[in-house]
Image (spheres, coloured by chain):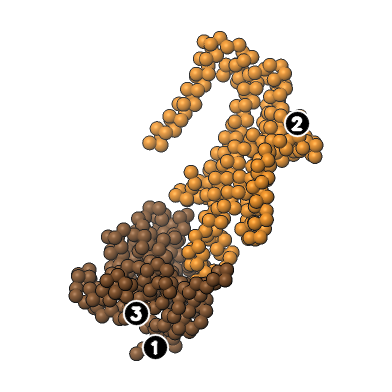
Chain colours: A orange, B brown
Amino acid sequence: MNLQRYSLAVLSHLALIVAWYLFVKFGEVPKFVMPSPYDTVQALLVPNYRWLENIAVTSIEIFGGYLLAVVFGIGAALLFSWSRPLEMAVMPLLVSLNMIPKVALGPLIIVWFKYGIGPNALMAFAICFFPIVLTTARGLREVEPDLLDLVRTLKGSRWQIFTKIQLPGALPYIFSGMKVAAILAVAGAIVGEFLGSDRGLGYLMLQVQVTLDTAAMFMAVILITLIGMVLYGLVLALERALVARDARLQ
Amino acid sequence: MAEPFIHLAGVQKIYRTRGTDFMAISEASFDVEPGELVALVGPSGCGKTTLLKILAGLHAHDSGELTIGSRSQPFDPARDIGMVFQQPLLLKWRRVIDNVLLPAEILGLPMAQSRARARELLALVGLAGNEEKYPYELSGGMQQRAAIARALIHDPKLILMDEPFGALDALTREKMNLELLRIWQEARKTIVFVTHGITEAVFLGTRVIVLTAGPARMADNFRVELPHPRTLEMKTSEQFGDYTRRIYRLLGMD
């Protein structure tokens, strides 16, 4: 069953590449509109494009901004669960701020912090922070009142309630926020690079756009996607390790 | 008569919300002897859950007298209460045995001994062999059995049960009633059992306390003189019928 599932998934991916190849070959599509898979891979051989360096830069922005968002998002939600007045004051503010299209902050970030790896990571952070803090806060709030009573009859401490019931109960929510954020982080970093940067895969895309090297643009998009897949895969693996199967939110 | 384990005299509870007082319990007075299984029966809104929470020390009462424990059976409110709710409320990320161990962890009991005891208790409630399973692998009735084992792990003197079989289907419920009687006889605990099931109250209770709603008050308190061990056939007996009719009449349903 599992083997069948995996092989079908691999097949559909391969089928897409084959369809792409056939479309370009028999559709006589010009190379600058759509390169073949072969041309796309060939783009990796252009040393001028500094693929490794650009991959590293974009990865640092994505992972850095994402990790910051995880740390601060979960941290903020924890503070809210410990202080009800703080939650009542700050949570509605966060909900309002969440309505800001984070991408629109790009030009401001450049004014405040110039451009580069740091500001782009900040962009990824801004876009990831909200889903993590909102889902984590919700998860920490969802505790069965009867379960709290059970601990209270045993004169359990707040810390015991937190470590034994609240936090493990919130983990599935935390991970659902982290999975949404993982996809957003990639978009945040790339938009940051589009708006202002001198390195990274998004920057490279703008450079090769000028020379109409569509194959390199294709390659950059594929690499960006792969970075996102690695991040998402790591989050999934961590979830698998930490959250019991039945408790995972789908 | 032996010294009572629980003694209530004129216990009253009023909820105050925005100037309006709501009388949750107007006057509850009864004694429970050690080792009894007392059924608190009544319609919703009669204050039976409130009363249970007062016994659990989760709510304070407003007036009246409440003592739990006696010289021969001293009572420590931190470790002598086991609770079972309508929902099993097992932690779904913990294996069954680790769920049973939760109170032992909170109380800081020695883990190796508690683990051995958890295995014994799971066998007692009929869950031997399910120790390493996760709650979702168990049926509702089995989950509630695990919740009963959890309530017993720290060897409390008093078990408080709030409609523990209310969410189960009728047949499972009958089966769990028999199981509870067996567990009660083996574990030798005092149990206070809240239910809205009249036959359940008579079938389980050594004593039945009837509460009526609006205003919530205690309407009756009688011993059930059916022999132990109880059997399902007893439910069709004349005597059983007399007890249930007595309760139906008090609740205005005859």
Question: Which residue in the protein does label 2 denote?
Answer: A196
Secondary structure under the numbered disc 3 in the rendered image: strand
Coordinates of residue B69 in the picture (x, y in percent): 44, 83
Callout 3: few (<14), some (14-19), or many (20+) C-alpha neighbours within 10 Å? some
Judge by depth and name the residue closer to the eye, B227 or B134: B227
* Image: B41 above or below B6: above
Cα gap from disc 3 to disc 2, whole angstroms: 80 Å
Secondary structure under the numbered disc 1 in the rendered image: loop
* Image: A175 above or below B207: above
Circle 3 chain = B
Coordinates of residue B89 in the picture (x, y in percent): 44, 60
Residue ID at (71%, 24%): A206
Callout 1: few (<14), some (14-19), or many (20+) C-alpha neighbours within 10 Å? some
Q: How many marks?
A: 3
Secondary structure under the numbered disc 2 in the rendered image: loop
Question: Which residue in the protein does label 1 denote?
Answer: B3
